[in-house]
Image (cartoon, rainbow, N blue to C red):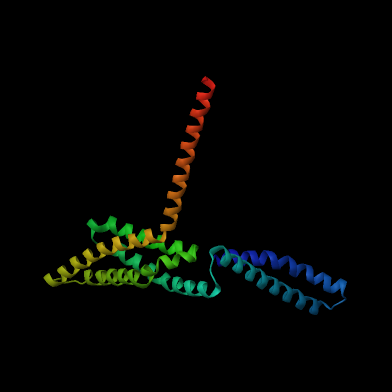
Amino acid sequence: MNRLVTSIAGIVISGPIAVIIWPVCVYGFGQTIILSTIWSVLGGVLAFGASSIYMTARFLKKHGLSRKEYRYIQGNVKEAKSKVFRACKALLSIRHIPSLKERIELVRMIRKIYSLTKKEPKRFYQAEQFYFSHLDSTLELAEKYVFLAAQPKKNKELDLSLIETRRTLEKLTKTVEEDLYEVISNDIQELDFEIDVAKQTIKNTKESSLITGSKKWK
């Protein structure tokens, strides 16, 4: 849920209410300016809180989540934010041209999974392996590679370690790709269903046209 949008909506709703309350208190009930101001501010705050509660409840209902589930997901996604940033930064800092395209693709998939689960929290359950395992592994390997590659002197053992790290990152790229497909698996199934329905509709239309045409010739 976009907090900025929620805040703006709350201000749009509570602002006019606070403005209306002040003259009503002063001219309608004969309250003092100070007391009317207090009631106006209090009314605006209550209206802002009520609008926030309403929008949150509407958001949770739309995505089929309880408040407890949403807090759990929100906490994990928030914690992953810095990991996503660090992992992407480290991957793009690796100075190995042959693997650049693959690393850019890995960064793109990591960001995509994060943005999808942030926008639609319920997808988090399909991305748990990514958040609890694969993201951490990618971050650790990428940062370790950058650290070791930056050493002024290298030996055969270090070179082998860097090669092995790159190979492992290649495997992780395929794993993260599977994570992404898992996150969008429902969308793929829905699309396949819509395609089947469209094909059946086209088939029925053609058959209906043929039957109509044959009747005309008779």
Residue 94 in view (yes/no) = no
Classify residue 164 as left or right of residue 127.
Answer: left
Name the residue at the left extreme.
Answer: 156
In the foreground, 164 or 149: 164
Horizontal and vertical percent position of residue 31: 85, 77
Name the residue at the top extreme.
Answer: 217
Horizontal and vertical percent position of residue 62: 57, 63
Horizontal and vertical percent position of residue 59: 57, 65
In the foreground, 149 or 8: 8
In the foreground, 31 or 113: 113
* Residue 99 quadrant: bottom left
Residue at the spot x=41%, y=71% of the render?
Answer: 80
Residue at the spot x=41%, y=65% of the render?
Answer: 126
Classify residue 88 as left or right of residue 57.
Answer: left
Classify residue 147 as left or right of residue 205.
Answer: left
Residue at the spot x=71%, y=72% of the render?
Answer: 44
Residue 98 in view (yes/no) = yes
How many numbered discs?
0
* Residue 27 quadrant: bottom right
Horizontal and vertical percent position of residue 217: 51, 20
Classify residue 153 as left or right of residue 69.
Answer: left
State which quarter of the image contains the N terminus: bottom right
